[in-house]
Image (cartoon, grey):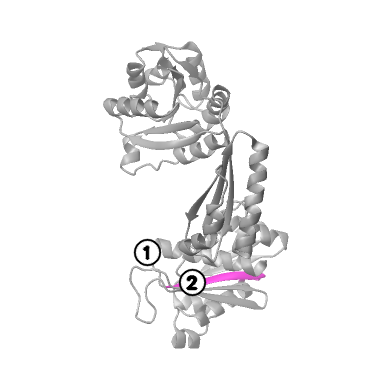
Amino acid sequence: MFAEIITIGDELLIGQVVDTNSAWMGQELNKIGIEVLRVVSIRDREDEIMEAIDTALRRVNIVLVTGGLGPTKDDITKQTLCKYFRTELVFNEEVFQNIKRVLAGKIPMNALNKSQAMVPKECTVINNPVGSASVSWFEKDGKVLVSMPGVPQEMNAVMKESVLPKLHERFHTDVIIHRTFLVQNNPESVLAEKLDAWESALPECVKLAYLPKLGVIRLRLTARGKNRTELEKTLDTESAKLKNILDNDIFSEEDIPLEIIVGDLLRKNNLTVSTAESCTGGSIAARISSVPGCSDYFRGSIVAYSNDIKNTLLGVSAETLGKHGAVSEETVTEMVKGAMKAMKTDCAVATSGIAGPGGGTPEKPVGTIWIAVGYKNEIRTYRQETNRGRSMNMERAGNNALLMLRDMLK
């Protein structure tokens, strides 16, 4: 069963708002056996909304629309849907009572808020538990269109509580199961070559996708069919073959962030960590501290951009800085030692490099980043040399640092 998502709003197309709704909806729809065929973003224009709906309903059985349901003049989705489905807006007392409940004690009721209770006559109305914009469920020729608010928190709530259960009940869908493996040490082309024979022999019901990130590749196996038990057995068999081929290059059998993987290892082993960062500017510390409960193992960070801070707070010697420079194996080695000493931690990571876009030399071109990880008396270093632009260089360094720490702790 296929669905199409239509997101409405000029703000999406000018980059003022990032569409996070579609990604979340795609994940949740997959869980009930509905695959998103296409995502379309359009402006708040009647003719464009009409055209997008018409095209989508010719292609799929389920169309999910978000946005354009506010009380202001630029929100025209309800009126356009009435025109498309040849109906009219009518006042709905149940929706009005829900609006009063949602707004009570927060926003005074006025004519604009009350107008939210005007809903398409020929549809099933679903109340919004956390907002004033209701959901409209239309059915035509065996197909379903659902119009929902674009505010992520509201869309999430109505999808979870009402729309997803109704879709699951309304359509008899296939079972879709995903298995994701996180792989290191392999560029995408090299990995594809390693897996060529196995991939070519995969059963018809199983598909493989390569999802590269910076320094990490996610391999997603997707099985689709009618019988969940049989699909699970097939995935078990193919997963075992994959693990036999890649062995230790697979560092996780779940699609979870590196900072969570490292945090779990630190907590399991009752260890503490700190960071000493130059070119990554504290971004590794930010990732580690984004995990709830990280205070169990994360002690802190020193962002040592200048050589003076490297020297005074991390104990990097003036001789090392003078002889080898800030971007060197010797400097990050002393930085990681200094971090463990200053913050009294069992392990640490350190970075120093040239993130770009300027600052490179023939000996140390832009993209050169030295990384060190330390665990008690052991220190490992790595020179990262790929230049993909400042932000990507920094992100790759963070991934490499966390991968190195994970490997050391294992």
Residue shown at 65%/77% (left/top)? 378
Q: Position of residue 116 (x, y in %)?
A: 41, 19
Give the residue number, with chain letter if any, for mark 2. Answer: 304
Rounded to the nearest whole Å, what is the CA distance between mark 1 and mark 2? Answer: 21 Å
Is disc 1 surrounded by few (<14), some (14 to 19) or many (20+) residues within 10 Å? Answer: few
Placement of the C terminus among the 4 image quadrants: bottom right
Q: Who is closer to the viewer here, 67 or 404?
A: 404
Magenta residue check for 148: no
Q: Nearer the viewer, mark 1 or mark 2?
A: 1
Residue shown at 49%/53% (left/top)? 210
Quadrant for residue 228, please give it.
top right
Q: Is residue 268 above or below residue 131?
A: below
Which amino acid, mark 1? Gly
Magenta residue check for 349: yes
Q: How many marks?
A: 2
Residue shown at 63%/58% (left/top)? 243
Q: Position of residue 119 (x, y in %)?
A: 42, 16
Magenta-tinted stretch: 343-353
Q: Who is closer to the viewer here, 79 or 288?
A: 79
Which amino acid, mark 2? Ala
Q: Who is closer to the viewer here, 269 or 204?
A: 204
Secondary element at image label 1: loop
Q: Which mark, residue 389?
A: 1
Secondary element at image label 2: loop
Residue shown at 34%/44% (left/top)? 15
Q: Position of residue 394 (x, y in %)?
A: 45, 64
